[in-house]
Image: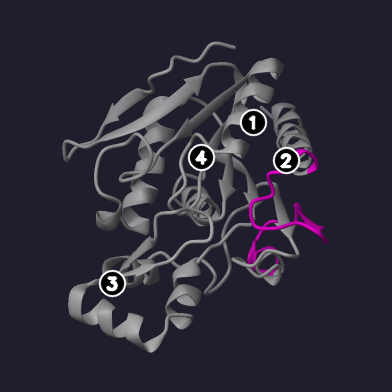
């Protein structure tokens, strides 16, 4: 497989550009939505690309506004903005039915996509999916952070996954409330597979059970890895992910 070193760029109406790689292939295609402050060069996104290329399946990975190789500043982003980016990639860079694979925050974005584009999104695979995570983020903030959020509009939270701190903005917290999906039934009828580590210190494993309870669809599989962490990027984890994605795509293919 020979992807260009430089990604393609999707121009957005405000002059910013979303970086993406698209591999044409069979439908249903797969779109990977990465996590908070993550990008499309992550282990899971790249491993899926190679595996699906070998299987001849369409695959798309991209960077949200302010992430990776896309333009914009991370601190200016929000769940609404990043959802709009993902929908633009879906609408303008892919064709036909798609399975969304959402990692952590990408799970929230992916569920929003499923609700907003039911004609295009036919399946969803969550990896430590973290819908509505801004609620937990705000609740876990120390008092000083909450004060900084009000006085300067942001707080720099140290990250265990990166040398760069997480820049948590008041805009992110406030906008998150407009995108919550766990307040009632999640009106999606397609197949769903949730992969969740039980040693995840970022997303409580019970979150996966909450998601499956609130999904309208009855076609839900929850896989709990007793020793799995938040990343789920070990070889066995990647194999489980690939099997879950391709099994879903194959089942959907019979219905196209």
Question: Residue, x 24% and y 35% (percent of image)?
Answer: 12
Q: Depth check: 172 or 167 in front? A: 167
Q: Element at badge 2?
A: helix
Q: Name the mark on residue 48.
A: 1
Distance between mark 1 and mark 4 Cα atoms: 24 Å
Residue 214 percent across, percent down from the top left: 64, 68
In which quadrant will I find the C terminus? top right
- The image's colour scheme reads one colour
Contact between marks 4 and 3 (CB within 8 A): the answer is: no
Q: Which residues are magenta?
A: 210-236
Return the disc, 1 or 4, that comes first in the chain's sequence: 1
Q: Depth check: 90 or 170 in front? A: 170
Distance between mark 2 and mark 3 Cα atoms: 34 Å
Return the disc, 2 or 3, that comes first in the chain's sequence: 3
Return the disc, 2 or 1, that comes first in the chain's sequence: 1
The residue singled out by tag 4 in the image is 119
Return the disc, 2 or 4, that comes first in the chain's sequence: 4
Distance between mark 4 and mark 3 Cα atoms: 33 Å
Contact between marks 2 and 3 (CB within 8 A): the answer is: no
Mark 4, mark 3: which one is toward the viewer? 3
Distance between mark 2 and mark 1 Cα atoms: 8 Å
């Amino acid at each position: 497989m020979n992807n260009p070193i430089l990604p393609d760029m999707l121009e957005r109406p405000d002059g910013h550009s979303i970086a993406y790689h698209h591999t044409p292939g069979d439908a249903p295609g797969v779109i990977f939505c990465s996590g908070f402050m993550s990008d499309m060069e992550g282990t899971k996104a790249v491993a899926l690309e190679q595996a699906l290329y070998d299987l001849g399946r369409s695959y798309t990975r991209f960077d949200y506004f302010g992430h990776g190789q896309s333009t914009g500043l991370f601190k200016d982003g929000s769940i609404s903005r990043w959802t709009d980016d993902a929908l633009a990639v879906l609408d303008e860079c892919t064709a036909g039915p798609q399975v969304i694979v959402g990692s952590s925050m990408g799970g929230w974005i992916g569920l929003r996509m499923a609700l907003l584009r039911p004609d295009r999104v036919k399946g969803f695979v969550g990896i430590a999916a973290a819908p509505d995570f801004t609620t937990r983020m705000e609740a876990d903030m120390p008092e000083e952070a909450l004060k900084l959020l009000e006085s300067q509009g942001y707080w720099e939270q140290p990250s265990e996954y990166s040398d760069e701190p997480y820049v948590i903005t008041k805009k992110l917290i406030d906008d998150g409330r407009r995108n919550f999906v766990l307040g009632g039934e999640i009106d999606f009828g397609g197949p769903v597979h949730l992969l969740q580590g039980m040693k995840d210190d970022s997303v409580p494993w019970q979150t996966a059970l909450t998601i499956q309870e609130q999904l309208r669809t009855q076609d839900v599989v929850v896989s709990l890895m007793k020793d799995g962490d938040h990343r789920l990027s070990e070889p066995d984890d990647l194999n489980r992910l690939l099997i879950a994605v391709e099994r879903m795509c194959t089942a959907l293919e019979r219905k196209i």
